[in-house]
Amino acid sequence: MVKTPSQPQLIPPLENGDRLTRYEFERRYATMPQNKRAELIEGVVYMAAALRFRSHGEPHSNIMGWLWTYKIATPGVALGDAPTVRLDSDNEPQPDAVLLIEERCGGRSRVSEDDYIEGVPELVVEIAASSAAIDLGDKKRAYRRNGIPEYIVWQVFDRKIDWFCWQEGEYISLPVDADGTIRSRVFPGLWLAVEDLLAGNMVRVLAVLQSGLAAAEHGEFLQQLSQISD
């Protein structure tokens, strides 16, 4: 009997709503065009829609500018723009921004050999327009269950920013101080002028951040990071 050559196994395309393991998600994701974005949240695939300028692109650039300014003033801290995070067996999100403490400085995440974040980054940010139900639902639960210390959700249509902090297995909302500022508990000196960010007043946002960077708490944090890395 003449054996016919076996046909190569075709990899199914990644489809919105697929229920997959993280391994299978990555296998299918690898065959997608490079400009496509997809996430695995609680075992379900979510494909990103086209991103609009006012409801996503501009807010995203403003939040990145704020975080980048903090990052360059804080050696030992790294910033990622929409990186893939291997969180657990059912979750591989792509947060809009990730701020983390580098592993050598005591951070809880690492960069894998194939260049993905693995573990728990200290801060994740989501710009929530049409995705608000996911970002405040399944994604928030996944981040909370994995113990991500801080989670910011910018609800663009509702003109609202929630900054959650992990405490005893739950997320609590960080308070807005009398001067309209939220102050990170994980990244000393990371101060956010909430109403100014919502209004697009980035000059004021960065001025408040500079006050945080000049505060004693930020200097102490720099010393801690330096001592651990040594």
Image (cartoon, rainbow, N blue to C red):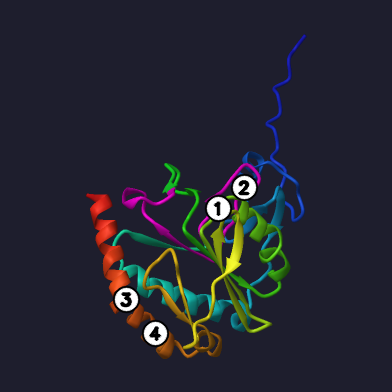
Q: Nearer the viewer, residue 40 or 88?
A: 88
Secondary structure under badge 2? loop
Comparing labels 3 and 2, the label whose residue is closer to the camera: 3
- 3 or 4: tag closer to the N-terminus: 4
Distance from disc 3 to disc 4, alpha carbons, whole Å, reads 9 Å
Decide which of 204, 63 is in the foreground and name it.
Answer: 204
- Are the residues flagged by discs 2 and 1 in contact, CB closer than 8 Å? no
Count the labels in the image: 4
Between the residue at mark 3 and the residue at mark 2, the CA separation in whole angstroms equals 43 Å
Whichever of labels 1 and 3 marks the residue nearer the N terminus, that label is: 1
The amino acid at mark 2 is: Thr
Q: Which residue is tagged 2?
A: 31
Residue wearing tag 1: 147
* Residue at mark 2 to residue at mark 4: CA–CA distance: 44 Å
Q: Is residue 3 above or below residue 229?
A: above
Instruction: Identify the magenta region.
Output: 83-109
For residue 213, the mark is: 3
> Residue 2 is drawn in which quadrant?
top right
Badge 3 element: helix
SS at mark 1 in the image: loop
Q: Residue at x 62, y 51 (%)?
A: 145
The CA distance from mark 4 to mark 1 is: 28 Å
Cβ atoms under marks 3 and 4 closer than 8 Å: no
Residue 11 spot, x, y in % from top left: 69, 40
Amino acid type, label 1:
Gly
User: Which amino acid type is shown beneath numbered disc 4?
Assistant: Val
Residue annotated with mark 4: 208
Say which quarter of the image contains residue 140. Answer: bottom right
Check residue 98 for magenta coloring: yes
Which one is earlier in the sequence, the residue at label 4 or at label 1? 1
Mark found first going from the N terminus, 2 or 4:
2
Query: Residue at coordinates 29% horizontally, 57% vertically from top-left?
Result: 225
